[in-house]
Amino acid sequence: MKIMLAEDSKTMRGLILIMLHRLGYKDVTEASNGKEAWKHLRTHNCDLLITDWNMPELSGIELLQKVRQDTQLADLPVIMLTSRN
């Protein structure tokens, strides 16, 4: 399974990456903001998008809107994370 992980916090990205690896998921591409993630999603096949809600340049919700509007990505499973209350 190819996973795109979009998270602006390097620490949180690292923790999520460790958890995914422990669960057996090794094919994970990291992006530090939604803009980087969008660029990757448009040019590479992914099976799952894990994204933070709040990110610079392109937020997680804006990224989700772009994914859902794209006919090739509209059915991509998405898990959205946040550390906000």
Image: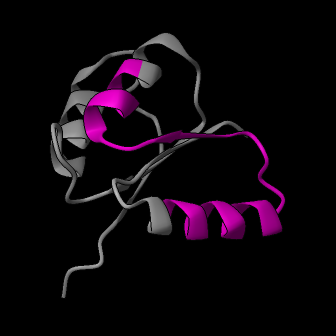
Furthest residue toward bottom: 85
- Location of residue 55 with respect to 68 vertically, above or below: below
Residue in the image at 41% along x and 15% along y = 42
Residue in the image at 38% along x and 44% along y = 32
From the viewer's perspective, tell me whether residue 49 is left or right of residue 14. left
Q: Residue 3's image quarter?
A: top right
Q: Residue 63's image quarter?
A: top left
- Location of residue 69 with respect to 51 vertically, above or below: above
From the viewer's perspective, tell me whether residue 45 is left or right of residue 60. right
- Location of residue 70 with respect to 62 vertically, above or below: above
Q: Which residues are magenta?
A: 13-39
Question: Horizontal and vertical percent for residue 17?
Answer: 64, 60
Question: Horizontal and vertical percent for residue 56?
Answer: 17, 46
Question: Horizontal and vertical percent for residue 48?
Answer: 55, 43
Residue in the image at 29% along x and 71% along y = 82
From the viewer's perspective, tell me whether residue 62 is left or right of residue 39. left
